[in-house]
Structure formats: structure tokens, C-alpha cells
Amino acid sequence: MDWFPHLALEGRHATYLEFPRGTHGHPADLDVAVVVVDTSDWRTSLERIRITGGQGTINVNSWAPDARRFAYVSYPGVDA
């Protein structure tokens, strides 16, 4: 189950958290990916950032106003 998307203010880009297949809910401490997409093509990722994360990684929309950057939380320890 992927976590809901966060749209950039310009409306052209979004991020969402991709959980491993078979994950129920949005638990912590998993190998996940922060996925960046163009909203005109949700099936093709522009970037996939693999991290250790889950609950709390992107709980709020964290895009910069110019849509060039966004923030996320990777859990301390080892990144995937």
C-alpha cells in the first residue's frame, strides 16, 4: 500500500511513499522509496529514493515553493 501523494504548489510534480508489497497500513522501520512523479504520468517515476522509513517519512507536504526541492525523513541507522 502506497501512502497518499503530496503535490507541489505548481501542480506538476508529486511525491509519495512506496511501501513493500503486502504492507498493511503505514508502519515504521521498513525499506521504502520516496517516489517523485510528474502528475501528467503517475506510472513513470522521475526519481525513486530508497531509504529506511515509513510512518513519519512524509507526513506533511514538504515541497519548496518553487517545486525544485522537497524534504523527507529517513530513519537513523542504515539507509536502504
Image (cartoon, rainbow, N blue to C red):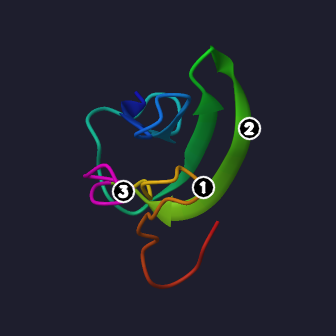
Instruction: Classify residue 50 by image quadrant.
Output: bottom right
Q: Residue at x 37, y 59 (%)?
A: 57
Return the disc, 1 or 2, that comes first in the chain's sequence.
2
Q: Are marks 3 and 1 in contact (CB under 8 Å)?
A: no
Horizontal and vertical percent position of residue 10: 47, 35
Q: Give the residue at x 52% y 38%.
A: 20
Residue at the (41%, 69%) spot, across then down: 73
Image quadrant in which the C terminus is located: bottom right
How far across and how far down the image is residue 79, in percent? Answer: 60, 73
Residue kind at label 2, given as amino acid type: Leu
The residue that mark 2 highlights is: 46
Q: Is residue 57 magenta?
A: yes
Q: Earlier in the sequence, mark 3 or mark 2?
A: 2
Using the image, tell me which numbered label, if any, was put on residue 68: 1
Residue 77 numbered mark, or none: none
In this rendering, would 4 be left or right of 34?
left
Mark toward the start of the polypeptide (3 vs 1): 3
Residue sitting nearer the eye, 76 or 65: 65
Identify the element where label 3 is drawn: loop
Which dot marks residue 62?
A: 3
